[in-house]
Image (cartoon, helix red, strand yellow):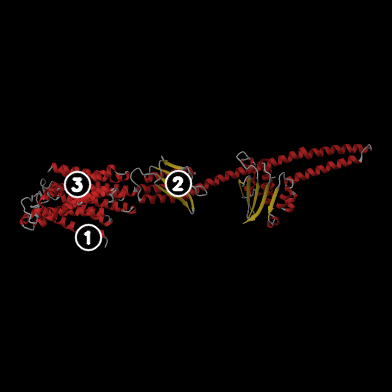
Amino acid sequence: MNRRWVCLATLGPIGVAALVYIVVVRGFIEADADHGLAWPMLGVLPLFVFGMWLLTVSSSRTALFIALAATAMLVGSAYETFMQRNLGLMTEPWFPLVNLIGLTADATATAAFLVVFATFPDGRLESRWQRIAVAVLWTPLLVGPLTLITTPHVVMSQYIGISGDAIPNPYAVPWLEWAAPAVQFLIAQPWPAVILGLVLLASRALFGEPEVRARTRVMAITVGASVLAFGLWTFVPGFWGIEVLVYAALIAMPIAAIHGIFRYGAFDIAPGDRGRNVARSSNLLITVIYAIAVAMPAILLAGRLRVVPAILITTLLAVCLLPVRTWMQRAIHRAVFGDRDRQLMMLSELGTELERAGEPRELLSRLAEAVRDGLGASWVQIRLASTDGALAASPVGVAGIVSGDPILSADLVRGDETLGRIEVGPRYRGEYSDAERMLLHTVAGQAAASVANVRLTAQLAEQLDELTASRERLVAAQDDERRRLERDLHDGIQQNVVAQIAALRLARNRLERGELTAAELAALQDQTRETLTDLRELAQGIHPPVLTDNGLVAAIESGAARYPIPLAVTADAAVRAERYPDDIETTAYYVLREALANTAKHANASHAAVGLARSNGHLRISITDDGCGIGEASPMSATTGGLANIRDRVAALRGTVSVSAAEPSGTTVLVDLPVDRDVPVEREAAGRLG
């Protein structure tokens, strides 16, 4: 059987039996004004209830010591009650043996509480001298056997109020009587152990490591207040205000222990169980404190109040303190689990807030504000992820002043894609509960769809803008091409035709006069042949016949000989044999012409290469050179230069273009054109450009 359940099954019945005995004897059998129920009912009972509860949730030694100390206090009170009502037992020769019960009970309570305080919150110490000091704290347990064998008279518990100096101790060993004074001052009086325990606790709370100081600070303050209250009670007896202070200090000890559970995992309670256990222990302790507060006037003022006033005061306190009890339970519940009402409101309003947002930055700002308000966080920031899944360095949505590292985070996940991450700073008060962590993940899941939709809308808007700009550039390119054709026709072929018409008129006049020679007719024939050549070159610039007749590879190879630097064209037999749609071939041809023209003009290359391949329904073209590479000032890198024209042509067919550095030097342009699917209506415009 588990050790803690054995302890619970042992200590629980002993403590309950002692408490029942005290209440029955003092409250019913010998009820009087000086019933003495205040100490066991108001001082010990909260500690006992808390100790028994601890045994149900923790198997740590510290929890066992609290339960042991509270049980020993009840046993000691029961022994005092028994002896005060049975004084005749003191004359019996075996009484010194019975007296060991009271001495051991008081010593056990003192030593166990000192060890709990000195080793709070988890029973582990930081240095060797502290561990030795804790071992010394158990020395009060020797009071019973040592006084029995060294002191010739019976040493009674100081809380009974009866001196044992006149009661002989037949069990004393004469040759050990010399040690009686030392036993009396070092062990029978527990002050040395108490001082040592307080010094140990103070050293950890004031001079320990920062983490140790934080973990022990609240308990050290509580113990210090208790010592002060007991000191006043000792030197100013009979004052009911100080007595109330003593009981309040005793009640504060389990409260400090609950704080240790919640913040630092006292009594080795796992992080996942802290919130639930704190809520349960707090509710239990609040119920006990409420009952004690209601009964306190009747217990403390029993000798001064009649029955009816006592009943009226008790009833009035029960009614007045009920809202306080409810408020305390709600406050602790909010501290442990968060403000559920506010969190539910945040979830209900989050959808509306997200619907109002029109663009990603506004949406993420609203989301950050909602998370910050719902969790009570000092700051919240949201970072979006790029296409490769890496989080952006700068956040898009921010609420509060960001400082330090985030305490919580939750990814915005849509399907298998991570859209971003919500990062949350520390709370204004306390730590985040498990429920608040779950709430953050719930909010992240709810917001991911909205973030994905708004981001998609923004991407579509951006693509639409780019498509509009691309169409405008295509139209502008068509206009420029028409003007170029017009200029070439006007400045070149048209002038040649005008000159030929004038020459023909002159030839006719000379023919009428019989002066025309064969050489003049031959010159006119040569001029006409040159005009025909110019027309053919102009037509080839618009759409080369070899492209129509023999295909893309042949058209590229036909111009390779005229290229100003060596140009290698690589294509497998399947690519050479296949004919592609006119718009694909035309776009690929002019993309190659423009890329090669830019290479010849700007790259300072000594060699260039073109590769064509067919794979998975795509025609892939690579143009590589060994030149100086592409830079920001290159026409290929400008949005209105050669690369922009290439991108516009390829985008019209839903293709892609990428530019990268070649190894060891130069530039590589990769063009990917889909050839096995429908493409948009820009095909015709892309095919006509040249």
| Dot 1 amino acid type | Ala
Task: Choose mark 3 or mark 2, whichever is in front.
Answer: 3
| Callout 3 touching callout 2 (CB < 8 Å) | no
Which residue is denoted by mark 3 in the rendering? 194
Q: Is residue 347 left or right of residue 139?
A: right
Q: In the image, what residue occupies the spot 21% across and 43% down?
A: 225
Q: Nearer the viewer, residue 284 or 215?
A: 215
Whether residue 27 is visible to the viewer of this picture, yes or no, is: no
Callout 3 touching callout 1 (CB < 8 Å)? no
| Real-space Cα separation, disc 3 to disc 2, in angstroms | 61 Å
Residue 354 tag number: 2
Q: Secondary structure at mark 1?
A: helix
Marks 3 and 1, how far apart in space?
A: 30 Å
Question: In terms of secondary structure, where does tag 2 sit?
Answer: helix
Instruction: Give the camera-side residue of 332 and 95.
Output: 95
Pointer 1: what residue? 9
The kind of residue on which mark 2 rests is Leu
Left or right of 276 in this view: 664: right
Q: Which three-letter amino acid code belongs to the residue tagged 3?
A: Val
Along the viewing direction, whichever of 529 and 598 lies nearer the viewer: 598
Quick one: quadrant of the C terminus? top right
Q: Residue furthest bottom?
A: 1
Real-space Cα separation, disc 2 to disc 1, in angstroms: 56 Å
Residue 345 in the image, given as x and y percentages of width and height: 38, 47
Label drawn at residue 566: none
Q: Quadrant of residue 144?
A: bottom left
Q: Is residue 177 in view from this perspective?
A: yes
- Residue 25 point in image, percent of width and height: 11, 55
Pointer 2 local density, CA inside 10 Å: few below 14, some 14–19, many at least 20? many
Front position in the image: 199 or 508: 199
Q: Earlier in the sequence, mark 2 or mark 1?
A: 1
